[in-house]
Amino acid sequence: MYHDSSIKHGGSCVGLAVGVRAAFLASNILGNLVSEDRVMVGTRNCMAEAFRMVYPKAHTVLRRERNNQITVQSRNLNLQIKFAPKKKYRDGTQALSAPDWELFESVNLNQREK
């Protein structure tokens, strides 16, 4: 996922690697996303591009305000991934091998409000 995303992104970076890790985490919880699903990214565009690559059918938007979290609305579920305080990594490969607790402050799955 990281390799394919970096080709489309025009290079590799830490933000893209963390975005791929978040997308992989979401895929383990929610499975495949479809066109009715929505991904709202309140971080950097690199992370949004990672989700667009991993989930090409889902509608991915970059929020204007940064809240350091990604919200995935799928079917009747909301998945919120909040990022841990930033840590310096020398490159994307180092971020890919970091433990989840170092990248993500919290991961919450809730019923969507109607």
Image: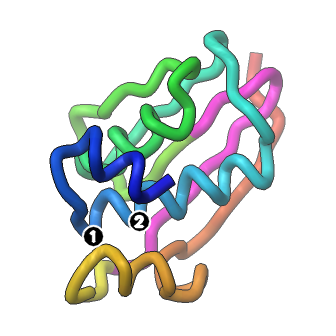
Describe residue 84's horizontal placement relative to residue 23 as left or right: left
Q: Position of residue 6 (x, y in %)?
A: 30, 52
Q: Quadrant of the C terminus?
A: top right
Judged from the image, the secondary structure of the residue bearing numbered disc 2 is helix
What mark, if any, has residue 50 been given in the picture? none
What type is the residue that disc 1 sits on?
Val
**Residue drawn at (62%, 12%), measured in percent from left and top?**
35
What type is the residue that disc 2 sits on?
Val
Write down the quadrant of residue 16 in the picture. bottom left
Looking at the image, the residue that sits furthest to the left is 10
Q: Determine the CA span between mark 2 and mark 1.
A: 6 Å
Q: Count of labels shown? A: 2
What residue is disc 2 on? 18
| Main secondary structure found in the magenta portion | strand
What residue is disc 1 on? 14
**Residue drawn at (47%, 40%), measured in percent from left and top?**
51
Q: Position of residue 67 (x, y in %)?
A: 34, 52
**Residue drawn at (28%, 62%), measured in percent from left and top?**
15
For the residues labelled 2 and 1, say whether their Cβ atoms are less than 8 Å apart.
yes
The image shows residue 30, relative to residue 87, as above or below, that is: above
Q: Position of residue 52 (x, y in %)?
A: 43, 32
The image shows residue 95, relative to residue 52, as above or below, that is: below
**Residue drawn at (36%, 79%), measured in percent from left and top?**
93
The image shows residue 73, relative to residue 11, as above or below, that is: above
Tell me, yes or no, whether the highlighted magenta stretch contains residue 15.
no
Tell me, yes or no, whether the highlighted magenta stretch contains residue 80.
yes
Residue density around tag 1, few if under 14, some if 14–19, many if 20 or more, within 10 Å: some
Judge whether residue 24 can be spotted in this image: yes
Residue interval drawn in magenta: 72-85
- The scheme the figure's colours follow is rainbow
Residue density around tag 2, few if under 14, some if 14–19, many if 20 or more, within 10 Å: many
